[in-house]
Amino acid sequence: MPISTRRLARSLAGSASLIALALIATPAAAADPAPAAPAQAAPQVDENDDGLATITVTAQRREEKLQDVPLSVSVVRGELLDNIAAGGQDIRFLSGRVPSLLIESSFGRTFPRFYIRGLGNTDFDFNASQPVSLVYDDVVLENPILKGFPVFDLERVEVLRGPQGTLFGRNTPAGIVKFDSVKPSNTLNGYGRVSYGSFNNVNAQGAIGAPIVDDTVSVRISALYQRQDGYVDNVVPAGTTRNRFEGFEEFAGRAQILIKPTDQFDVLLTGQLRTLRGTARLFRANVFTKGQTGLNANFVRDRVSIDGQNEQKVDTQNLSARVTYDTGPVSLISVTSYWSGDATSVGDVDGGFGANFLPAGLFGPGNIPFTAETRDSVPRLRQFTQEFRLASNGDNALSYQAGFFYFSEQLRIVSENFSTLGDPNNARGGVNILVDQDQDSKAYGVFGSLTYKLTDQLSVTGGVRYNNDDRDYFVARTRDTQFPNFLQDPLGTVRRSVNGENVTWDATVNYKATDDINLYARAAKGYRAPSIQGRILFPANTAQTLEDGVTTAASETIQSWEAGIKSTFLDGRGRLNLNGFYYDLDNAQLTAVGGGVNSNRLLNADNVRGYGFEADAELRPIPNLTLTAGLSYNHTEIRDRNLTTAACGVQGFDGVALCTVRDPIVVPTAPFTSAIVNINGNSLPQSPRWIANWTARYSVPLGSGELYAYTDWAYRSKINFFLYDSVEFQSTHLLEGGLRIGYKTGRYELSAFARNITNTTQAVGGIDFNNLTGFVNEPRVFGGEFGVKF
C-alpha cells in the first residue's frame, strides 16, 4: 500500500536534499586541508597500510578496544555493513553475519525475531517477549515493531553473546544486538549513496553533519528511502493479478543536535521516525510434501494462489535526550527516550484459495480444509525509558559504574479473522472474529559494576543488578459473528497480571598474557521477565473458555559459563578470537505455535541446556587483501520429561496428521484434534548447530583510487521450525553469498553488486495450521550503486 502523497513527498524531498547537500558540499570539503571523518566508520577504527583496523566497542558501556573486552563480542561495520545492506534488505541481513546470530520473521520487514546461541522466541504476536534485547543508541527497543527500525548511518553493530544482565538488564539472557549511530561532530562531514537494482529497487541514503555554533552546537541529519516493486503474481483461477506482492516503500530519518556549552557538559537530542507501506510475508500453501523434506513442485517463487488480503504498514516515532556531565573523577549520564508507533499486517494464513468442500478446481494448491485470513494491528504503542548512570573516569586501578533504569510500555493489540472464500479482493467487512487487547508493562532495575586491576596483567570484574517487572493484560472486547459459541464475549472480564523480581550478576577474570594475547573467564546469571500471551482468536481447545486461551509464563533464569582467548598475530596483520560456553536455562519460556487451531501458547520447560563455541578471525596477508571468517557451534536441548505440545493439524474428520512427527506420541490424533507429543530432548526451534561466515576483499591501485572486489558469504545448518520434530517442517542448510565489484577514490565510489548470487532457494519458516504452508528466503538481486563521502 503506497505511502500517502504528502508523506511521500516529504520523504523523497528529505532524501534528495541530503544527497544533494552531500554532493554540493564536496568541493568545499575538498578545499579544506583538514581531513574530515568518513561517514560510516570513522571514530572506531585506526587503519594502517599493513595491519588490521583497531576496533573500538562500547560493550561495557565505555569505549574500549575489542581485543581488551572480556566478552564474546562480534562487530559488523564499514564495508561489510554496506554490502550486506545493498539491495534494500531490512535488518534480517545481519542473520548469520556473526557467529551464533540468526534473525527471521513471519511478518517480513515489520517484526524481526532474534536468536543468539539458539535462544530466541518464535512467538508471532505483537506482545511477544524475546530473550535477545535490541539496544539502539543506549535505548532498549522492546516491542517487535520497534526492533525492525532500519539500519543506516551507523558507526557499527555490536553483537554481545551470553547473558548481559548487569549493565543492560531487562530480557537479555541470550545477549544483545547493539546499534550505534554516527554522532554530530565539529567538522563538516557526510555521505550520500543511491542504488538501483532488481524489481525496480531504489535504495537511497545520506547524512550531513556540521558545526552550527563553533564547537558549542553541531547537528547531524540522516535519512533512508527504499522502495521495490512487487514481483509475485497472484494466479488464482479467477484471473492473474500481476506484480501484486513483495513490494514496499519505506522512509526513515534521524536528526541529532549536540549542545556542548562547556568541555564538561553536553546534551545530545535525537528525533527519529519510520514509515513503511508494503505487503506482508507471503505464505505458500502445501509447498511441503508429507514424508519429505524440502520444497515441492507447488512452489514457484514469482507465483502464488491466494484469496485473501495482503498488506503491511508501520509508523514509529522517537524523541530522546542524552545528558552527560563530567565532574572529573566521575561522569553522570542521563538517557531519556520516548517511542510511539502503530502497525498493521494482514495475510492469507492458509496460503491458498477456496476450501476442499468446494468442487474440484475451486480450491488449491493442494488440500485446503478451510480458509484463514488474519490481521494483527497495534493501534497504540507507547514506550518510555529513563536511565541514570554514574561512571568513573580515568585509567585507575579501580573503575566502576552504577545506575537506575525505568521502563514503561502501553500496548493495544487488535486481532481480526476474516471470512473469505475464493475472493482475492475481499473487503474489510468480512471480519467475523475480533479480539481487542491491552497490555501495560513496567520495570525498573538498580545496578552496579566494578573492575579492579590486581596487576598490570590481571583484572577482575563483578557486577550485580536487581530487576523488578510487572505486566497487566486485559481483553477489552471480542466478537464472533460466524461461530457465536466459539468465543464467548467477556466484556472485559479477562485479565491477567504477572510480576517478578530477580537478582542477576556477572563475574569475570581477565589476564593479559602478552601484548597480543588476552585470556578471560566469565560466569553470569541472566533473567527474562514473566510473559503473557493472548492468542485467543482460536483457543487451544474450542471447548475451553475464553480465559483458558490466555497463557502466561513465569520468569526464566540462565546460568552461563564462558572462557575465551583474544589474540593478534603477524605484527597486527591477523586476529583470532575464540571462546567456549555452557549454559543452563531454568524455567525456560517457550512458545508452542500452530496446531489445528493456530494457537500460540506459552510454556515453561524445566531446563534447556546449551553449549558450544564461537570464533572470529581476520587476516591481512598482504596490504591489498583482507580475509575474515566466523564460525559457531551451538548444541541446544530441551530437558523436561513431562513437557508436551500439540503437533501439526489434522485433515478434518479422518484425523490423519498433516505432517510426519518423529517425537513420542502421548495422545494420538483424533478428528479435528492434533496429536500431543513429548518434546523432551529436542533442540530449540530456529537453532542451527553451525553458523559460518566469511569475506574476502582484494584491490589494485588504479589512477587516484582503487579497483576492488568484495565477496561475503553466510551459512547455517539445518533448523526445525517448531518445538516438535517433524520431517516436513524443517529446513536443510542455507548458503547465501554476495559480490560487489567497484572503483573508489577517497571521495567517490561506483560499484555493481549482487545478493544471494547463487539464487539459493530454501524454506526459512512454516505455518503449522491447516496445511503444509511455508515461506522462503529472499531472491537473487543485482544492482548498481553510486556513493560520495566527505
Image: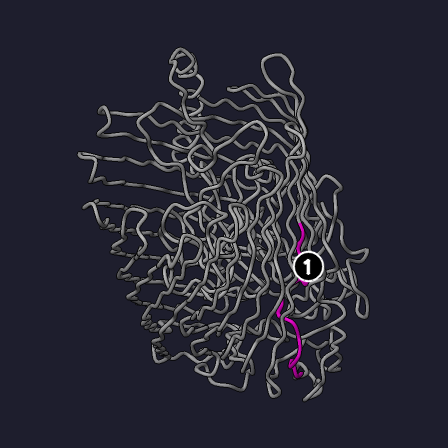
- Residue at 20% x, 40% y is 265
Quadrant that contains the C terminus: top left
Please provide percent x and percent y for residue 569.
Answer: 61, 42
Callout 1, which amino acid?
A: Trp
- Residue at 25% x, 55% y is 390
Magenta region, mostly helix, strand or loop?
Answer: loop
User: How many numbered marks are there?
Assistant: 1
Q: Nearer the viewer, residue 152 or 522?
A: 522
Q: Is residue 586 visible?
A: yes
Looking at the picture, does residue 667 appear above or below residue 736? below
Looking at the picture, does residue 609 appear above or below residue 327? below
- State which region is magenta: 677-692
Q: Nearer the viewer, residue 23 or 346?
A: 23
Q: Is residue 491 visible?
A: no
- Residue at 75% x, 59% y is 732
Q: How is the image coloured?
A: one colour
Determine if the magenta segment contains residue 789: no
Please provide percent x and percent y for residue 759.
Answer: 74, 43
Query: Which quadrant would residue 439 be assigned to in this image?
Result: bottom left
Q: Nearer the viewer, residue 722 or 523?
A: 523
Please provide percent x and percent y for residue 80.
Answer: 58, 38
Label 1: which residue?
A: 690
Determine if the magenta segment contains residue 680: yes
- Apparent side of residue 736 relative to residue 40 in the rendered image (left or right): right
Please provide percent x and percent y for residue 532.
Answer: 42, 74
SS at mark 1 in the image: strand
- Apparent side of residue 751 relative to residue 787 in the rendered image (left or right): right
